[in-house]
Image: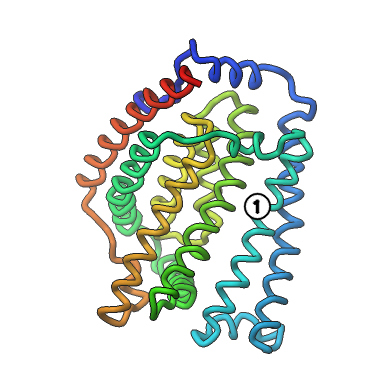
Amino acid sequence: MNELQPSILEDSQEFQNFFNESKSKPAISYLGQLAILIGLLGVGLIVGSLIAGIVFVAMTHTNLLDLEKAMSNPAYANASKIAQLVGSVVIFFAPAFFYALIVNKKPFQQLGFSKKISAVQAIIVAGIAFTGLFLSGALAHLNEIIPISHKAAAYFKQLEDKYSEQVLIMAQMKTVADYIVSLFVVALVPAIVEETLFRGGLQNILVKWTKNAWVGIIITSVLFSAIHFSYYGFLSRAMLGMVLGFVFYETKNLWLSIFMHFINNGIAITGLYFSMKKEKVTKESLNDDTYPLWIGLIALLIIITLFQLLKKETAKQNLSA
């Protein structure tokens, strides 16, 4: 695993700028920055949930007290998509943006939005995303075979079924237009807002605070997976979070981690769309993409190799900038 240790050629001006920034004492301590981000996230969660509920009720003319039941109704799938779109922006993106605005006069630069990407970087990241699907499937299999009590298994199965039902409602796609809307609402927007919060915000703070990329990325990835409240998908999402974290750390470019996240989400939506055209999709069929552990090991080796190529291409880009 040493091959994944983050590094950028030290003769790169970009590396020197980042190194000096991480060594200098910030105006607000990293603990203070973390407290600001968490506080804003708490406010965003309350306000975003309230706004999403109001939007849904306004669109469906349902009762706010029956919100949970109404959102489980497939007839209100479009309203659910719009409500989630608005809610996710307020819950995830807004806290990260206002945190960055507090600590830096250039918030988008603070979050990692300020750089361009090369075609080669994009191709490599796309390769990492596709290969990651096999590693994810192997980890999903590992998650399933880890022994747990019958009571815990029943509880986690209930949570998984509820999550799958929401996915099926959100991803109702009967036409190409529905598919495009789902790509935007369920794939692109979550990729932007979640990467802004977790990689641009939280990971940035933790890596600089601990001065250890592995610690910052692992903690961020665990939290990233935990917010999805899915036990059987926990290892897969934690792995996805780590890969996204290393993509961002190696390139210092949030657009690339957003691109990879979008590919990951987009593949799932695309597969679901074509499955819906052929046959009825059930919540059980959403969780059957598992692979043997040996396939996951091969995928991991390929991902490590692709990261080496990404490092070289990023260093080349930095030297030519």
Q: Name the residue at 59% across, 23% down.
A: 211
Furthest toward the top, the residue is 11
Q: Pinpoint residue 248: horizontal percent, then vertical percent.
A: 50, 36
Provide the residue designation for mark 1: 93
Q: Name the residue at 72% across, 70% down.
A: 51
Image vertical order of residue 17 relative to residue 89, above or below: above
In screen coordinates, is 273 left or right of 46? left
In screen coordinates, is 185 left or right of 202? left
Q: Nearer the viewer, residue 164 or 22?
A: 22
Count the marks.
1
Image vertical order of residue 9 relative to residue 157, above or below: above
Q: Pinpoint residue 242: horizontal percent, then vertical percent.
A: 45, 40
Q: Tell me the element at label 1.
A: helix
Circle 1 Cα neighbour tier, 10 Å, few/some/many (<14 / 14–19 / ≥20): many
Q: Quadrant of the N terminus?
A: top left
Q: How is the image coloured?
A: rainbow
Q: Pinpoint residue 120: horizontal percent, then vertical percent.
A: 36, 34
Q: Pinpoint residue 191: horizontal percent, then vertical percent.
A: 51, 53
Residue 161 position by quadrant: bottom left
Q: Name the residue at 42% across, 46% down.
A: 260
Q: Amino acid at mark 1?
A: Phe
